[in-house]
Image (cartoon, grey):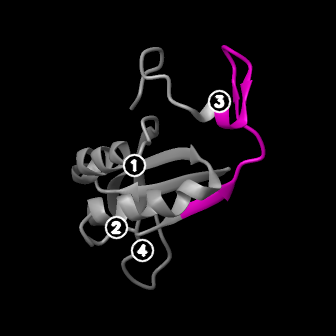
C-alpha cells in the first residue's frame, strides 16, 4: 500500500476529485496549507511580502500499489498540464491500514463505504 500526498491549487479541487472518482477513489483527505516560496537568495524572515506565500490544498489518500500509476495519471489529466505549484507529489509506503470502527485490516479497510462514511 502507498500513501499519496499532492499539493494543488484550490481551483483544481473539483476537477481532481471528479477524476479520482472516475478511477474508483472515493475517499481522500483535503487540508489547507500555506506554502512558503523563497523569491531570492536572501534568508527567509517573518513578515516578508505576502507574495512569498501561496495557499494550496494538500490531498492525501492511501491506495493499493497497483493503483498508484492510475491515480497519478488521473491527477495529471485533471490538472490539464497546469503547473502544480510547487509540483510535488509524495508517494510513501504504508505498513498497515486499520479501520478502527470495524477492526478491518489493509485492503478491506481501504475500501470505500459510500453509504456509511463521509467521502471528501
Q: Position of residue 9 (x, y in %)?
A: 29, 56
Instruction: Name the one closer to the observer, 42 or 116.
Output: 116
Nearer to us of marks 3 and 2 is: 3
Nearer to us of marks 1 and 2 is: 1
Q: Position of residue 106 (x, y in %)?
A: 71, 36
Residue bounds of the magenta highlight: 90-108
Query: Disc 3 designates what residue?
Result: 109
Task: Examine the rendered structure and indicate whether residue 19 appears above or below residue 38.
Answer: above
Find numbered disc 1 in the image and state the secondary structure of the residue it sits on: loop
C-alpha gap between disc 4 and disc 2: 17 Å
* Mark 4 surroundings: few (<14), some (14-19) or many (≥20) residues within 10 A: some
The image quarter in which residue 41 lies: bottom left
Q: Which mark is residue 23?
A: 1
Find numbered disc 3 in the image and state the secondary structure of the residue it sits on: helix
Q: Earlier in the sequence, mark 3 or mark 4?
A: 4
Find numbered disc 4 in the image and state the secondary structure of the residue it sits on: loop
Q: Position of residue 78 (x, y in %)?
A: 28, 59
Q: Quadrant of the C terminus?
A: top left
In contact (CB < 8 Å): disc 1 and disc 2: no
Nearer to us of marks 1 and 4 is: 1
Q: Position of residue 16 (x, y in %)?
A: 31, 51
Find numbered disc 2 in the image and state the secondary structure of the residue it sits on: loop
Task: Examine the rendered structure and indicate whether residue 85 appears above or below residue 112.
Answer: below
C-alpha gap between disc 1 and disc 3: 18 Å
Q: Which mark is residue 38?
A: 4
Identify the residue at image location x=63%, y=56%.
65
C-alpha gap between disc 3 and disc 2: 30 Å
Amino acid at each position: 500500500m502507498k500513501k499519496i500526498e499532492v499539493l494543488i491549487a484550490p481551483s483544481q479541487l473539483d476537477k481532481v476529485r471528479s477524476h479520482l472518482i472516475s478511477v474508483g477513489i472515493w475517499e481522500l483527505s483535503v487540508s489547507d496549507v500555506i506554502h512558503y516560496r523563497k523569491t531570492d537568495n536572501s534568508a527567509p524572515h517573518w513578515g516578508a511580502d505576502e507574495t512569498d506565500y501561496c495557499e494550496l490544498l494538500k490531498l492525501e489518500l492511501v491506495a493499493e500499489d497497483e493503483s498508484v500509476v492510475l491515480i497519478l495519471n488521473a491527477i495529471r489529466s485533471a490538472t490539464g498540464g497546469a503547473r502544480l505549484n510547487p509540483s510535488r507529489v509524495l508517494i510513501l509506503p504504508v505498513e498497515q491500514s486499520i479501520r478502527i470502527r470495524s477492526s478491518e485490516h489493509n485492503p478491506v479497510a481501504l475500501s470505500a463505504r459510500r453509504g456509511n462514511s463521509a467521502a471528501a
